[in-house]
Image (spheres, rainbow, N blue to C red):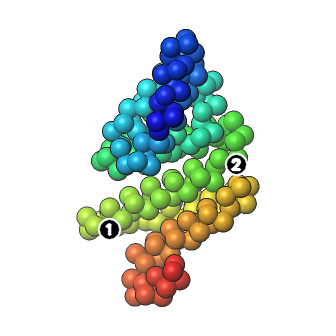
């Protein structure tokens, strides 16, 4: 983060506002992983002022997916799912199929979290959309250079959902995860 901020400031001094804006966009992901969700969303929302062509280019780095998860984590669920759908549509439109796997995984996790929330409130949970996006994530993982990691994450998500759907098999599923 220090390097990214320093480079963004250097660009500002040298008048490279476009490069500075790109570097600041990357802070969306950096702050997500640091757990600073307020700054994550600030930088993401700031990136929305970039021209659409540049936003398309930056979508290769899944910043919208991290912002969508952050919206959910900060209690803004109503913004999370539409943003993910928009990001996935953008990636499809641009033909960025390598990036779809991670976006599908994050979207599946968002959908799983929403179904868990419904269960905790005593409502009916439907895991159908979660399963559909998880399957698409697994299918696209073969296109991604991080296939093993993505497939492991997908397996953990799948088994977690099974624990919720069939609690009587929870011990077996937890052993399977480990």
Q: Is residue 148 visible?
A: yes
Q: Is residue 6 above or below residue 137?
A: above
Q: CA distance from mark 1 to mark 2?
A: 33 Å
Residue 70 in the image: state x and y as whole percent. 39, 46
Residue at the image point whose x is 63% and y is 54% from the top: 101
Name the residue rendered at 51%, 53% in the picture: 107
Q: Nearer the viewer, mark 1 or mark 2?
A: 2
Q: Nearer the viewer, residue 40 or 93?
A: 40
Q: Is residue 89 left or right of residue 164?
A: right
Return the mark for residue 98: 2
Foreground residue among 178 and 109 = 178
Would you place residue 154 above or below residue 16 in this image?
A: below
Label located before the other in sequence (1 or 2):
2
Disc number for residue 119: 1
The residue located at (44%, 55%) in the rendering is 110
Which residue is the extreme one toward the top? 15
| Image coordinates for residue 34, horizontal then vertical, percent | 40, 48
Q: Tag 1: Cα neighbours inside 10 Å, few (<14), some, or many (≥20)?
A: some
Q: Residues within 10 Å of mark 2 (few under 14, many from 20)?
A: some
């Amino acid at each position: 983060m220090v390097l990214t901020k320093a480079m963004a400031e250097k660009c500002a001094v040298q008048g490279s506002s476009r490069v500075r804006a790109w570097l600041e966009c990357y802070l969306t992901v950096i702050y997500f992983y640091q757990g600073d969700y307020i700054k994550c969303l600030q930088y993401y929302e700031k990136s929305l002022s970039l021209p659409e062509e540049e936003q398309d280019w930056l979508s290769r780095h899944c910043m919208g997916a991290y912002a969508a998860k952050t919206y959910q984590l900060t209690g803004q669920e109503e913004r999370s799912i539409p943003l993910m759908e928009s990001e996935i549509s953008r990636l499809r439109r641009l033909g960025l199929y390598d990036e779809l796997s991670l976006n599908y995984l994050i979207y599946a996790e968002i959908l799983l979290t929403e179904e868990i929330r419904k269960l905790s409130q005593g409502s009916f949970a439907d895991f159908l959309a979660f399963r559909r996006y998880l399957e698409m994530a697994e299918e696209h993982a073969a296109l991604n250079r991080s296939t093993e990691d993505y497939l492991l994450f997908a397996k953990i998500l799948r088994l977690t959902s099974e624990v919720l759907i069939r609690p009587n098999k929870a011990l077996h599923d937890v052993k399977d995860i480990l």
